[in-house]
Amino acid sequence: MELSKNFDHQAAESKWYQHWLDKRYFNSKPDSREPYTVVIPPPNVTGVLHMGHCLNNTIQDILVRRARMQGKNACWVPGTDHASIATEAKVVQMLRERGIAKSSLSRDEFLKYAWEWKDKYGGIILQQLKKMGCSLDWDRTTFTMDPDYYQSVINVFIDLYNKGFIYRAKRMINWDVKAKTALSDEEVIRKETLQKLYHLRYAIEGTDKFVTIATVRPETIMGDTAICVHPDDERYKELHGKFAIVPLVNRRIPIITDEYVTMDFGTGALKVTPAHDMNDNQLGQKHNLEVVDILNDDGTLSADAQILVGEDRFAARKKIIPMLEEAGALVKTEDYTSEVGYSERNPDVVVEPKLSLQWWIEMKKIYSPALKAVMEEEIKFFPPKFKNLYRHWMENIKDWCISRQLWWGQQIPAWYTADGSFAVAATQEKAWEELKKTQPDLKMTDIKQDEDCLDTWFSSWLWPFEVFKGYSHPGNEDIKYYYPTNTLVTAPEIIFFWVARMIMAGFEYKQEKPFSEVYFTGIVRDKQGRKMSKQLGNSPDLLALIDQYGADAVRFGIMIASPAGNDLMWDESSNEQGINFIKKFWNALKLVKMWEGRQQKDLDNGKANFAVSWMENRLSQVKQQLDQQFKDFRLSESLKTIYSLIWDDFCSWYLEWVKPGFEQPIDADVYEKTVSFFEELMQILHPYMPFVTEEIYHTLREQKDDLTVKLLETGITPDNKILQTAVLLQEVITSLRDARNKAQLKPKETVKLHILTEQADLYASIETILAKQVNAEAVSYTSTPVNNTITVVVQKDKFFIETTTELDITAQREQLQKDLDYLKGFLLSVEKKLSNEKFVANAKPEVVDVERKKKADAEDKIKVIEESLREFSANGRE
């Protein structure tokens, strides 16, 4: 294979991905091997790749590729979620552009347009995953509206209803006025918002007195049905049992008492609007208050508001203030900051609390096994800190509103008669048969199906088993082999939306956990710490990044800075680091290929044996580290381990140690070992950077297999003595080179090296490499210091560099003193940081470890320089 100057990522990506597909390496069928199963968190069918997808799917691909290379039957299932709210919004927008209003269409007509949109745009994100190199089993692609999947969702609803777990009731819900649908609590994003607090006075009936309340929502006063005060509040004792008059609409409302009211907040008097506040609704039920709903589904004021009818709620807020002022009801206005709920699907829309007739799941009836499984670590969380969050939510679980006022989705299988009675059944005919038991004269045409569809999460909670048709076709070979799955990789923000509910569904319908491990990724943030979003314009175009840098560099860039469960600050420079890494080992490839035609048998006579032996042991040591790191899901740390092994150990040290002289031959056995090491390095890097590693593997020499499916070999037990000797050798070479540079010796100038040591046998094994690396024509051992030389101290050993060049001893000493002064100052700054208890307590452990290493390194260097300066004095060279 002809070697190009640089790695051509675009050519390699298209070539190798198609090759892997053609070979069907990603396809899985049940067999005798151990399965390793991952189901993709199904992206919205409306979606396009963003940095969060990049992180999540890169992690999954790393785990799946590594499992495949360990000989496991790796199965990674792709698919998409129908995303009711998001997709319906896209379809409505498409219709608007065509001049069609949704309201002018029947449900069936609308769904035809929805399927048209899905067929045209719905597969984009899956195609984009291929650009990233994701090794998914594309034959298993699942969609939550596939016929079997759709029917399973319907049948689960019917089953839970028949078990008494699902009920229909009018309760307070979160309402998205733009999508015109209910939302679950988890679909509400709470944000600190700057508002105005309005102090309004209500006249006390039959007196000339007033009671003042404080509200951020003056436009809802028309829905007030009581004022509530604390029973022990002395300010309002005389008002108990009296009535107040709501400004502008003159409604007479009772003044009630309840300990729920906080006396020292606002004025201590609370307006109660049961139709438009969750807490007010509970007060209303407790005190049997009237409910006045003043808002339409689109957030405009209804006829029951009596004033400003048809105005948007926020426009009404602006308009009602001068009206209240004119009526003498506005006392004062002040700035006020509080949390406001926004729609997760429409981030600019403030959620409206609303009393609404919806379908609910009574969660306390099904949550218990799911809590136990995580607390007892039958399902392990990584990082484990999320266990407490999960436990808190589960122990305080609320009923789940599962109905949505949308057409795109699984339509609720309930049929109604004209009087409002209903039956839940799989078909209209079965519902009719049920309803006829109490209404014998009922015709099938007299009943009508519920217009609403089910919450999208109600379909995706079946994902781990229904992708294998475990509910629709129970007992099939796939579900028996692949379930429970192994690892779920997801974001912490959907721990309740999805993770908890999948665990519940798994125990409810398979009597078994859906997965064994959950790896929580962090949130991708920009370098200013802001979460990436379209609104902020700080989310880069992922496909453009792949085109520019290549999938490998982008995967490297996101993984090098992604500690498990912690947010990561992403910067485009991390892609540059990936590019530079590729350049480093691509140049190493070019160097090794240059030696290919310069091989000679039995040339080395054992001289390079130490380098080869060390690299073999270093590889084995790293393989052991990687096994543990992968077990603990420390994937970023694993990449750093591999990065250091390739960049430092292989490229910077090993290749230098075995490199033949200019136009000199290389020992054939050493060359063979070098190529084998290179292949192994590409193999352990492959899960992270699949394209460049496959390309290099096939460039090194003719191969009979592909790296993607090449089995990882277990290494030898590392020899610690060889590893420690290599560390010493590196330290000695670095120190001697540094001393040469400071003495301004030219690189080509040879020197004589004298070593004062008690471990001469050890140095004998590395003497050849050491001499070559510091350009020493001779190495000898001495029992006393050597005068008129450059002295270097490394650990317990002393090195004396003898040169024909006249040495400027004064300059040497001055330079050493400068270095010592600098290092002492540096050490002080590090010690100051480490003595700061706040820093040590709040900084990430890895950051503190870096500072501790800086301290230890500085102390070691200071020790060496001080020893060298003492040698100057001992040799009478002051």
Image: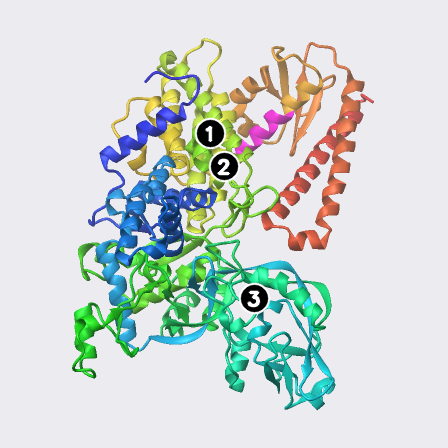
Residue at x 63% of width, y 21% of height: 737
Instruction: For marks 2 and 3, give the CA distance.
Output: 55 Å
Q: Position of residue 446 (x, y in %)?
A: 21, 73
What residue does disc 2 label?
Answer: 557
Identify the mark nearer the N-term, 2 or 3. 3
Specify the amino acid type for callout 2: Gly
What residue does disc 3 label?
Answer: 308
Specify the amino acid type for callout 3: Leu
Instruction: For marks 3 and 1, give the CA distance.
Output: 56 Å
Q: Position of residue 838 (x, y in %)?
A: 70, 54
Residue located farthest toward the right when viewing the structure as drawn: 878
Q: What crowding class fits label 2: few (fewer than 14 Cα within 10 Å), some (14-19), or many (20 or more)?
A: many
409 up-or-down from 2: above or below:
below
Magenta region, main secondary structure: helix
SS assignment at label 2:
helix
- In the displayed structure, does residue 507 sit left or right of residue 478? right
137 up-or-down from 297: above or below:
above
Which of the two discs, 2 and 3, sits closer to the camera?
3
| Colour mapping | rainbow
Q: What crowding class fits label 3: few (fewer than 14 Cα within 10 Å), some (14-19), or many (20 or more)?
A: some
Residue 549 badge: 1
- Foreground: 785 or 264? 264
Specify the amino acid type for callout 1: Tyr
